[in-house]
Image (spheres, rainbow, N blue to C red):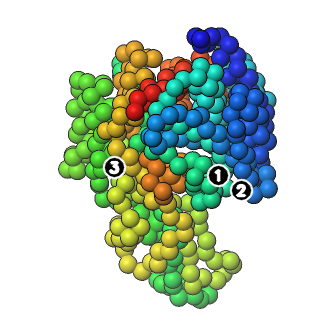
């Protein structure tokens, strides 16, 4: 039986429209209806899906395609929740599942209901064609990723690990093309930075504001924050950053390769970043790939204009490179901010790193290059975080692989969580085809 891609295209579009019309904005999430929709589709095709509620309305769905052989499964992990949308700023209703201008429009088309459909269609194709695999493939579409994943991937890991235990997992983000110069490089996520949110506290002498003095907590805190925003934390060259920068460089070749290579040497990295990378968003991303970062986001001090408070505090969003710990990070920010501050971690999640030197990564790269001749593939470190952090707790290595072929000028990162999020129908179909083939290529071999 061969695949009729015209039919698959219609099905994929219809499933994505249906999922977009179920509003799973998180908070509050309400992913149960979306989980039940997928369970119905899977059950119709002969799967035995399980819907699990982590809290009222918070739904997760898991299904399994049985292979033979003793190899541990491949897990296709996605999330059903989305971030809220300000509909008045959108060209089309973000929860309408509108098809227009060659695209499907709506919150979650890129992050990540489009990828849910890629994973769903992969499962349906395997089943319909009865592909004999050497391992199981597990489908898990979960709640709550956008708020930390405790009701979704975290819940499954903590309470239903037997259902999703796997040798590897594929989730967001990756398989995305970046256009640099003439080349086209797909980056696949192999690492992501960790999180260390910190409360920074300055103490001072209280008093009447009519008689200012030098021991003012507000002023001290401001000085510390100014230093943290001006002076970069130390340079760190990690394996994931080297693989990413060298991988993109070798795909581009020529002078671009040389310029990128310079970024990896501490003595010259900062000069190269400032002078050779003209696009500010690329330059800032490269900085974040080579440094722990810290960003003040919340301030609290005082309650009355004529009272000098005894305490001022800020919340800092800290991001840790692979290999770093809370202690090493706090030592770095203490050294920059100077003495006189307390630092209390509020939320910590360790960095995640998977080697790109595996047969699975090889399969992903080969299929991408076959489906987009002329393109290259490089590993990527995500400076944000995904549900891969929950899998890392139980040692399941994870790649970000939701292959999307976006047309030039359509910027993935500005559409994700932004207005007018949309996916070209062709890009969705490219993703279904590429993910299905990559899953087969990996799972058909022992
Ligand atoms: Zn996402």
Q: Which residue is mark 2?
A: 54
Residue 25: % across, % down: 73, 45
Q: Residue at x 38, y 46 (%)?
A: 354
Q: Give the Cα separation between the discs numbered 1 and 3.
A: 31 Å
Query: Circles 3 and 2: CB distance less than 8 Å?
Result: no
- The 10 Å Cα crowd at callout 2, few under 14, some 14 to 19, many 20 or more, is many
Mark closest to the chain's N terminus, 3 or 2: 2
Q: Is residue 59 left or right of residue 332?
A: right
Mark closest to the chain's N terminus, 1 or 3: 1
Quarter occupied by the C terminus = top left
Task: Determine which of the numbered discs, if any, sits on residue 152 in the image.
Answer: 1
Query: Circles 2 and 1: CB distance less than 8 Å?
Result: yes
Residue 307: % across, % down: 64, 83
Q: Give the Cα separation between the discs numbered 2 and 1.
A: 7 Å
- The 10 Å Cα crowd at callout 3, few under 14, some 14 to 19, many 20 or more, is many
Q: Nearer the viewer, residue 181 or 204?
A: 181
Task: Determine which of the numbered discs, if any, sits on residue 290 in the image.
Answer: 3
Q: Residue at x 70, y 16 (%)?
A: 10
Q: Residue at x 30, y 25 (%)?
A: 252
* Quadrant in the rendering for residue 13: top right
Q: Nearer the viewer, mark 3 or mark 2?
A: 2
Q: Is residue 256 above or below residue 234?
A: above
Q: Nearer the viewer, mark 1 or mark 3?
A: 1
* Quadrant in the rendering for residue 81: top right
Quarter occupied by the N terminus = top right
Q: Nearer the viewer, residue 159 or 194?
A: 159
- The 10 Å Cα crowd at callout 1, few under 14, some 14 to 19, many 20 or more, is many
Mark closest to the chain's N terminus, 2 or 1: 2
Q: Is residue 89 visible?
A: no
Residue 315: % across, % down: 55, 66
């Amino acid at each position: 039986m061969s695949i009729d891609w015209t039919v698959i295209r219609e099905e994929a579009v219809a499933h994505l429209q249906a999922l977009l019309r179920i509003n799973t904005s998180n908070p509050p999430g309400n992913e149960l209806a979306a989980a039940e929709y997928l369970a119905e589709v899977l059950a119709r095709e002969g799967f035995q899906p399980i819907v699990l509620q982590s809290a009222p309305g918070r739904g997760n769905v898991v299904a399994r395609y049985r292979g033979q052989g003793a190899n541990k499964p491949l897990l296709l992990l996605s999330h059903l929740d989305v971030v809220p949308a300000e509909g008045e700023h959108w060209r089309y209703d973000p929860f309408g599942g509108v098809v227009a201008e060659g695209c499907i429009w709506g919150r979650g088309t890129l992050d990540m209901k489009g990828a849910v459909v890629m994973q769903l269609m992969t499962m349906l194709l395997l089943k319909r064609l009865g592909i004999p695999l050497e391992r199981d493939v597990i489908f898990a579409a979960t709640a709550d990723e956008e708020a930390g994943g405790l009701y979704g991937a975290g819940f499954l890991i903590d309470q239903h690990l037997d259902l999703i235990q796997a040798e590897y997992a594929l989730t967001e983000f990756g398989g995305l093309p970046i256009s640099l110069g003439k080349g086209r490089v797909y980056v696949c996520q192999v690492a992501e930075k960790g999180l260390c949110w910190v409360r920074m506290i300055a103490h001072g002498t209280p008093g009447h504001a009519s008689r200012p003095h030098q021991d003012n907590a507000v002023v001290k805190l401001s000085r510390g924050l100014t230093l943290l925003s001006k002076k970069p934390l130390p340079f760190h060259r990690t394996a994931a950053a080297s693989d990413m920068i060298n991988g993109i460089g070798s795909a581009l070749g020529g002078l671009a390769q040389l310029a990128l290579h310079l970024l990896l040497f501490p003595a010259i990295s900062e000069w190269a970043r400032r002078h050779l990378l003209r696009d500010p968003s690329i330059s800032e991303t490269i900085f974040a790939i080579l440094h722990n970062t810290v960003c003040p986001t919340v301030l609290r001090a005082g309650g009355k204009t004529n009272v000098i408070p005894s305490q001022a505090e800020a919340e800092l969003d800290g991001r840790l490179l692979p290999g770093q710990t809370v202690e090493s990070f706090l030592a770095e920010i203490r050294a920059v901010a100077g003495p006189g501050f307390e630092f209390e971690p509020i939320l910590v999640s360790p960095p995640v790193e998977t080697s790109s030197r595996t047969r699975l990564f090889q399969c992903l790269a080969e299929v991408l290059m076959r489906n987009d001749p002329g393109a290259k593939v490089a590993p990527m470190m995500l400076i944000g975080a995904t549900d891969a952090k929950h899998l890392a707790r139980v040692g399941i290595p994870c790649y970000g692989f939701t292959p999307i072929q976006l047309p030039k000028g359509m910027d993935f990162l500005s559409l994700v969580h932004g207005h007018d999020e949309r996916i070209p129908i062709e890009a969705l179909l490219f993703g279904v085809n590429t993910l299905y083939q990559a899953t087969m290529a990996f799972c058909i071999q022992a």
